[in-house]
Image: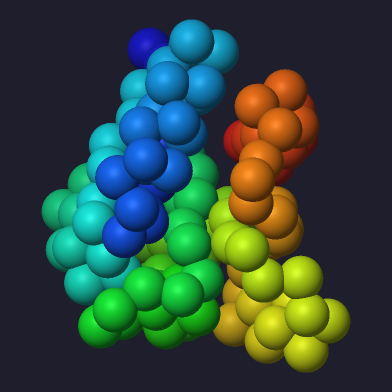
Amino acid sequence: MPKSILTVDDSKTIRDMVTFTLSRAGYSVTEAVDGGAGLALVNRQKFDCIITDLNMPGMDGLALTRAVRASATNRATPVLLLTTEADPAKKTAGREAGATGWLVKPFNPEKLVETVRKVCP
């Protein structure tokens, strides 16, 4: 059974690119349009990895990461932030929220797959 990945981003284009890239690499990918929708999915289903945007309306990626980490079921689930942000302060905030890693958009498809394989063997 393929590993399950949740991708959370308010950009349909980014969700489509992540889904296409990871599906071709053999992963099962579920999409959510924002942090609230992503958290609702996480509360219903166990994912092997979560990839979330940082800046989204409503619940942003940091709040989603903190909520995932607050759940005993998902405390160890890898969370990757995929964002246009490269500011060191934002990266620190991501680590403090519990993010496993940080990828900058636009992403390199091979690097995305390599990172997912690393955190979700």
Residue shown at the point (46%, 50%) measured from the top left: 50
Expressed as whole percent of the image width and height from the top left, the position of residue 74 reads 42, 61
Q: Nearer the viewer, residue 47 or 22?
A: 22
Residue shown at the point (72%, 23%) measured from the top left: 110
Expressed as whole percent of the image width and height from the top left, the position of residue 76 reads 56, 59
Q: Nearer the viewer, residue 93 or 78?
A: 93
Q: Nearer the viewer, residue 70 or 115?
A: 115
Q: Is residue 97 left or right of residue 64?
A: right
Expressed as whole percent of the image width and height from the top left, the position of residue 49 reads 50, 44
Residue shown at the point (48%, 10%) measured from the top left: 24
Viewer can see residue 21: yes
> How many numbered marks have been drawn onto this rendered protein structure?
0
| Location of residue 89 by image quarter | bottom right
Image quadrant for the N terminus? top left
Viewer can see residue 95: no
Residue 2 vs 48, above or below: the answer is above
> What colouring style does the render use?
rainbow
Residue shown at the point (66%, 41%) measured from the top left: 107
Q: Is residue 21 left or right of residue 44?
A: right
